[in-house]
């Protein structure tokens, strides 16, 4: 093996890959704007690449199709409840109750304090079961066409665990646009989260520490009309690619 083997070439350029690539792009853009913004070693390195200055700056700006309003940063009680960052203390519960009372007032409906307390409890429990499906739904996904797997029940995914009996399944619950709905019954909520997380395609993203990545996935799969459908030929093409990947 000589001094110019492929391994040596890879070793010489490996620092440009992975997470370093984005840093190098930004450093290259700084050099394109002002060569003196980087030290002499980087100046010599970038000068040797001979790229067009405009191309370098454009590359550093990111994809042309990137959303300017992304990532979304919701800062409300409902999102905090879903992420586990909302301790149920009286102040937060009162805030949620005020929101529900305001929504009722918009509809010209007068509600008692007792009804508001019950509505707040329903909302919080509904958010808890949604979060449970986001975390555990893949455990009961339909991934066994032969029916050989032991179907172990998961109490976390059962509305009864959260205080909802059969008689409560059709009661309207305020969920403030979580799942894309302002108000939904527990039956509707369970239907959506089961189709999203427990079908023949299982997705679990709550372990992702990057909120932008997790939000990107959530926004594209949750809610009515978010299901991805393929034609027969499309499904066959996907199967062929999966088979090719196995070999």
Image (tube, rainbow, N blue to C red):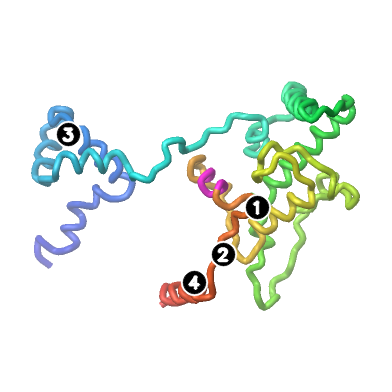
Badges 3 and 1: C-beta atoms under 8 Å apart? no
Count neighbours of disc 3 (C-alpha within 10 A) and say few if under 14, some if 14 to 19, many if 20 or more.
many
Position of 94 relative to 140 (above/below): above
Position of 8 relative to 246 (above/below): above
Count neighbours of disc 2 (C-alpha within 10 A) and say few if under 14, some if 14 to 19, many if 20 or more.
few
Q: Which mark is residue 229?
A: 2
Classify residue 1 as left or right of residue 27.
left
Count neighbours of disc 1 (C-alpha within 10 A) and say few if under 14, some if 14 to 19, many if 20 or more.
some
The residue mark sitting in front, 3 or 2, is: 2
| Residue at mark 3 | 31
Helix, strand or loop status at disc 4: helix
Alpha carbons under labels 3 and 1: distance apart:
48 Å
Q: Is residue 93 visible?
A: no
Classify residue 65 as left or right of residue 115.
left
Count of numbered marks: 4
Look at the image and give the residue range highlighted in magenta: 214-219
- Image position, residue 234 (x, y; %): 49, 71
* Magenta highlight: main SS: helix
The residue mark sitting in front, 3 or 4, is: 4
Badges 4 and 1: C-beta atoms under 8 Å apart? no
Alpha carbons under labels 3 and 2: distance apart:
46 Å
- Image position, residue 157 (x, y; %): 75, 53
| Residue at mark 1 | 224
Which of the two labelled residues, at mark 2 and mark 4, occupies the earlier sequence position? Answer: 2
- Image position, residue 151 (x, y; %): 74, 67
Q: Which mark is residue 235?
A: none
Q: Write down the quadrant of residue 94 in the picture.
A: top right
Alpha carbons under labels 2 and 1: distance apart:
13 Å
Helix, strand or loop status at disc 2: loop
């Amino acid at each position: 093996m000589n001094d110019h083997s492929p391994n040596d070439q890879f070793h010489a350029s490996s620092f440009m890959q992975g997470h370093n690539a984005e840093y190098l792009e930004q450093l290259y853009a700084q050099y394109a704007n002002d060569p003196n913004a980087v030290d002499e070693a980087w100046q010599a390195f970038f000068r040797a690449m001979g790229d067009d200055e405009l191309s370098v700056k454009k590359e550093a700006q990111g994809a042309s199709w990137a959303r300017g309003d992304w990532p979304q940063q919701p800062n409300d009680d409902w999102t905090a409840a879903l992420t586990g960052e909302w301790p149920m203390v009286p102040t937060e519960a009162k805030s949620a109750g005020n929101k529900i009372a305001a929504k009722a007032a918009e509809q010209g409906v007068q509600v008692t304090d007792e009804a508001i307390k019950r509505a707040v409890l329903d909302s919080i429990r509904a958010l808890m079961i949604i979060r449970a499906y986001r975390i555990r739904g893949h455990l009961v996904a339909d991934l066994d066409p032969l029916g050989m797997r032991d179907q172990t029940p998961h109490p976390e995914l059962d509305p009864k665990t959260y205080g909802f009996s059969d008689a409560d399944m059709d009661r309207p619950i305020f969920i403030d646009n979580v799942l894309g709905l302002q108000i939904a019954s527990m039956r509707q909520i369970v239907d959506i989260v089961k189709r999203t997380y427990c079908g023949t395609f299982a997705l679990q993203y709550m372990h992702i520490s990057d909120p932008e990545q997790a939000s990107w996935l959530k926004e594209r799969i949750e809610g009515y009309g978010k299901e991805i459908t393929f034609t027969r030929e499309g499904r066959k093409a996907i199967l062929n690619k999966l088979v090719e990947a196995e070999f």
